[in-house]
Image: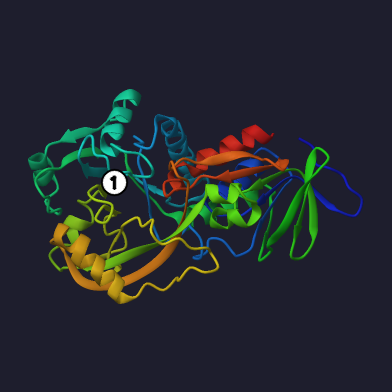
Amino acid sequence: MSALRLPGVETWDVIVVGLGAMGSATVHQLARRGARVLGIDAYSPPHTVGSTHGDSRITRQAIGEGFAYVPLVQRSNVLWRFMEEEAGTDLLTQCGGLILGRVGSDHKQHGKTDFLGRTIAAAEKFGITHDVLTTSEAQSRFPQFTLHGDETGYYEPGAGYLRPERCVATQLTLAKRHGATLRFGERLTSFRQDGVGARITTDTTSYAAGAVVLSAGPWITQHLSEPLQSVFTVNRQAMHWYDISPDGFDALSKDCPVYIWESTPETSFYGFPAIDGPSGGLKMATEATAEVTTPEDVNHIVPEAESLQKFDDVFGPRFPGIERRVIKAVTCLYTTTSDGDFVIDAHPDAPAVLVVSPCSGHGFKHSAAIGEAVTEKLL
């Protein structure tokens, strides 16, 4: 691909707008392939006002949201290891993952029913190492959980967690090392098709490029007109960290997998082992869809009362090793579609602009491979 050459306008092969999970992966892969690439972001990533923060993100190989996602996460795991070696840092920890629920459940997880059954089917189809556990087997193997008595367990030893802020920072560092130009604190205001390429305007200047990747996360609706805006819904999510009892740390750290516990929409939740020591607390969260918001209007403050209510209603009865004390709580934003799937497609009004919005609360684990796939599409 060659960039447009317009007199007096700075031109690039590709411009990536938004440098969170998807944008950082894309700008990194483009730079590795030798593209003249510019990455811009309205903030200074990794930051805490979007969707790519909170210390940890679950990664799992058998994807109950659909078989098509499995090759993406498997390729992403390979890419994370490449990046770890190149940058000399830790990004991916495969501590194992446990999903608890009921096969055949009509409860929707990321837009899909029978999440547990679909996960098991994905593991079988792709030959992913796993165990299917009865309630008594799961309780015996993972005594740090208090089971109700009717759960089926799916355990995957290759599952684990990623460090999202570190992943974004590493990819941006590697992108610069390979020649990318990054500009922070610069906000996209408009874009349009310009011949075979695109012209964008920010709050400081204008650029031209052969292609633009619009990976704006929860800000995506600002760059779409109706009816496309209504494809996406932005929800406020709260993540909570609770204190650990003195005798509960070992069971909730080195012996604990990541976990997803399906129940009702109000009481389903996910969480992590204690990855930051005894004083770091245990992180867990539900997924709320009732509170629709925007990045500008969201309330980023999580009152202690909100965390304590979640403890009483959801987390406390399931974990004998945590205390009713809040270490911290933060919000992030989910940008969801009605079916829980991703949107990666040319903008209908500007074909040179590729909308890259993997979202719906399960995109981070796939992001490295999506960046690679977008690069292969554009170059």
Query: Quick check: 311 above or below 270?
Result: below
Where residue 208 appears, as percent x and y from the top left, is: 80, 49
Where residue 36 appears, as percent x and y from the top left, is: 74, 45
Residue at image location 53% in from the left, 45% down from the top? 86
Towards the viewer: 128 or 254: 128
Quarter of the image with the C terminus is top right
Residue placed furthest toward the bottom: 304
Left or right: 338, with 136 as reference point: right
Residue at image location 33% in from the left, 71% down from the top? 328
Towards the viewer: 80 or 355: 355
Left or right: 145, with 88 as reference point: left
Left or right: 333, with 253 as reference point: right
Determine the secondary structure under disc 1: loop
Residue 274 occupies quadrant: bottom left
Residue 275 occupies quadrant: bottom left
Q: Which residue does the numbered mark 1 point to in the structure image?
A: 95
Residue 100 occupies quadrant: top left
Q: Amino acid at mark 1?
A: Cys
Quarter of the image with the N terminus is top right
Query: Quick check: 114 above or below 264?
Result: above
Residue placed furthest toward the right: 7
